[in-house]
Structures are given as structure tokens and as C-alpha cells.
Amino acid sequence: MRHALILAAGLGERMRPLTTHTPKPLLEVNGKPLIVHHIEKLAAAGVRYIVVNTSHLAQQFPERLGDGSRWGVRLRYSYEGPTPLETGGGMLAALPLLGPEPFIVVSADIWSDIDYAALPHEPEGVAHLVMLPNPAFHAAGDFALAGGKLYEGDGPEGAERLTFGNVGVYRREIVAREAPGRFKLLPMYQRAIAEGALTGERFDGFWRNVGTPAQLDELRLSVAG
């Protein structure tokens, strides 16, 4: 049974005032919350067990989403307290709710037509990341991709600098050795790259970051109808 983690614990500060009373993942596009877009896509890909990490206005998630039965999945919630634990700390805190096998992780504040069913069930290393052509707001990219592996800097000859699309498949080992607390995943990526254990793929389809009211409005126009 495939598992997934939806990262939904952010404070949504750049989305204010819309997030003053509503968590960003529960803002609606096409009549449904952003996070439901991911739940539906994960369910269609055969995922039956989804963990949602929460912090800001956390009680609204179970109130709106329930136990997931309406989508044919089981939803559980990993509450991080009033201060989010960042991507790494949040993943580590959620591990007890996830199974032993590799799991999909997606940020709730993106929108894409990435096919979750096509992602590898067993990454070659500790994680496999979906990479994008660099958007205007992140022109320098994050990592270089060559031959299915990710590198820091420009990578080997012929590599391409790309931006992480906030979707990936992870093994528990990527954070399991860390101490509980608040930390980012970037140092874990860098360690995995040094060990030759971080793979990736390029995605050229529809993808939008939903971080500000303007980006939310643009997405709503893009997918209207």
C-alpha cells in the first residue's frame, strides 16, 4: 500500500490576509481546496494512506477533510505545534505515521499535472526529486541534473540546472538519522548528493507555485473552466 505525505504546515505569511483565518492549503481553486487537488491525484495514483502535517489553524484540516473516506483514502494528521518544523523536521515527525516503504511527498501549495503514478516506487538512492525548468522567480535553479542524478553547482558536462518542483519520493533514511526538531531538508539533499544517492527527473508539464495572492489569482485564471 503506497503512502504519501502532504506538507501543509506553513504559516502562509506571504498569502496574508487570505491566510489570517484560513490555512493556505485550504484556499480554493475551481471550487475546492488546494490540498484536495493533491488528495484526488494521489488517490487516482493508487495511494491509499496519506499523512498531512499541520500547524497554522491546524484544526481546520480534519474539519474540512475528515478521515479521507470520501476520496477512498485514509488521512492522518501530524500536528507540529504552533511553530512549523520546516520540511526536514516535519518529515521526521511524520515518520511514525508512514509505512516502512518509500513514500511520495508533495507540498500543498503547488498545482501541477505531475503524474504521481509514474514516480518510482523504489528510488535508487534516498530520494528522487521532480525537477522543473527554472521559473522566473528562481532563475538560478537548485541542482544540476545529468543521467538521472542530481549534483550541486553546474554538475558534470552536459548537466542542466533545474528547480526542485516540491514533489518527490523519499526513503525514511533521508531524515531518520537526524535529531527531532526544526530543520530544513537542504542539508540532507546535499549529503545525499555527496554520496551519489539523490536522483531526479525533468518535468515539463503544467506547474505553478501558489505562494502569494497574485499567484493564486493567476492559477485560478489558468485553470478556470
Image (tube, rainbow, N blue to C red):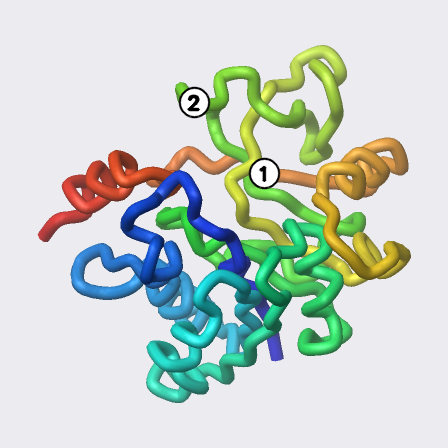
Q: Tell me the element at label 2.
A: helix
Asked whether disc 1 touches disc 2, contact meaning CB atoms under 8 Å apart, the reply is: no
Dot 2: few (<14), some (14–19), or many (≥20) neighbours within 10 Å? few
Name the side, left or right, on which 173 lies relative to 162: right
Q: Is residue 133 above or below residue 169?
A: above
- Mark 1 to mark 2 CA distance (whole Å): 21 Å
In this rendering, which labeled residue sits more in front, label 1 or label 2?
Answer: 2
Find residue 108 and report its image quarter.
bottom left
Please give left or right for residue 154 compared with residue 20 in the image. right
Q: Residue furthest toward the left?
A: 225
Q: Is residue 207 left or right of residue 190?
A: left
- Percent coordinates x, y for residue 88 in the rendering: 71, 51
Q: Which residue is under mark 2? A: 137
The image position of residue 106, as x and y in percent, is 52, 55
Q: Tag 2: residue type?
A: Phe
Q: Residue at x 62, y 43 (%)?
A: 129
- Indicate the quadrant containing the N terminus: top left, top right, bottom left or bottom right: bottom right
Residue beneath the point at 34% across and 53% down = 19
User: Viewer-proximal residue, 53 or 19?
Assistant: 19
Residue sitting at 65 percent across and 50 percent down? 86
Residue 33 x/y as whole percent: 29, 63
Tell me which residue sits at (34%, 55%) in the image.
Answer: 20
Q: If you read the primary sequence from the N terminus, does the residue marked by circle 1 or circle 2 appear first? A: 2
The amino acid type found where label 1 is placed reads Glu
- Return the residue at label 1: 201
Compared across the picture, whether 178 is left or right of 95 comes to: right
